[in-house]
């Protein structure tokens, strides 16, 4: 059992690593350290960085749709306190060749409708074109022939890099330690248990619990785990 006073080391300062640190600190854990290979945080080549990411509830799987709604509620309700106003609710347009039962468009619409979201059905390509021009404030140059779908007003996009940086600042404010420029070389193992990590510069980070949040770099960072062929990163 991991207790609040135990030492926790998180490898990776992207959205998964830094949010794990944030929630541990909010729950009363007192010794949380996050390390990352990049000197600059968030890392420029990380999946958690960039100036835009689509934020939507339009999923054919109801579980993901509900999870996304919870996330959007946080983007809105904690906009200033946590996210530095990095979420922009512009609406998201979902299109397909058919909205018949069983299609992605149909399932996503049903899941969004069940959650009581503000939606606008677009059953013809003309309605898609008119709605797009209305949103853009100008004539759309895209050919929408044969397309249909719907507009979800309660979705948008987020400045991913800004949001991750804001979360990192919160972790530090809560007493968490965040170090960049620390590339992990290997796990420190004692009697079959992981007790920390060793970095390429020789520095050691001992821990009662190590959380690996290295994303697509996991197989190359920890070759001893034998993840080659099991974990494949695509872009």
Image (spheres, rainbow, N blue to C red):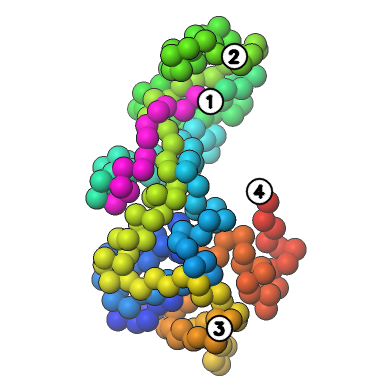
Mark 4 or mark 2, which has the lower sequence index? Answer: 2
Nearer the camera: disc 4 or disc 1:
4
Q: Which residue is mark 1?
A: 94
Query: In this rendering, is residue 130 above or below 192?
Result: above
Mark with earlier residue (3, 2): 2
Q: Give the dominant element type of the magenta stretch: helix, strand or loop.
A: loop
Q: Which residues are magenta?
A: 82-94
Q: Which residue is mark 2?
A: 141
Eye-nearest disc, 4 or 2: 2
Looking at the picture, tell me which residue is in the foreground, 61 or 40: 40
Residue that appears at 43% across and 17% down: 135
Viewed as shown, does residue 91 lie left or right of 59? left
The residues bearing labels 4 and 1 have C-alpha atoms spaced at a distance of 22 Å
Position of residue 204 in the picture relative to residue 234 (left or right):
left
Residues at marks 4 and 3, CA–CA distance in whole angstroms: 30 Å
Which mark lies nearer to you, 1 or 3? 3
Above or below: residue 84 compared with residue 144: below
How busy is the neighbourhood of tag 4: few (under 14 within 10 Å), some, or many (20 plus)?
few
Check if mark 4's residue and mark 2's residue have beta carbons within 8 Å.
Answer: no
State the SS at label 2: loop
């Amino acid at each position: 059992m991991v207790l609040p006073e135990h030492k926790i080391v998180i490898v990776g300062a992207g959205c998964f690593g830094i949010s794990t640190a944030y929630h541990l600190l909010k729950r009363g854990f007192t010794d949380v350290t996050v390390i990352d290979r990049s000197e600059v945080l968030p890392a420029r080549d990380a999946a958690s960085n960039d100036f835009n990411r689509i934020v939507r509830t339009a999923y054919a799987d109801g579980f993901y749709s509900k999870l996304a709604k919870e996330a959007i509620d946080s983007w809105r309700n904690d906009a200033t306190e946590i996210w530095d106003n990095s979420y922009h609710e512009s609406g998201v347009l979902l299109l397909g060749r058919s909205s018949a039962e069983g299609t992605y468009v149909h399932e996503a619409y049903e899941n969004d409708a069940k959650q009581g979201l503000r939606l606008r059905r677009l059953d013809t390509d003309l309605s898609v074109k008119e709605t797009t021009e209305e949103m853009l404030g100008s004539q759309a140059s895209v050919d929408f022939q044969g397309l249909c779908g719907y507009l979800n007003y309660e979705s948008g996009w987020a400045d991913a890099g800004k949001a991750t940086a804001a979360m990192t600042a919160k972790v530090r404010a809560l007493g968490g330690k965040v170090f960049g420029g620390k590339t992990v070389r290997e796990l420190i193992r004692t009697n079959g248990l992981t007790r920390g990590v060793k970095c390429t510069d020789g520095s050691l980070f001992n821990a009662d619990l190590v959380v690996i949040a290295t994303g697509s770099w996991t197989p190359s960072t920890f070759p001893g785990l034998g993840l080659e062929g099991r974990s494949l990163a695509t872009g």
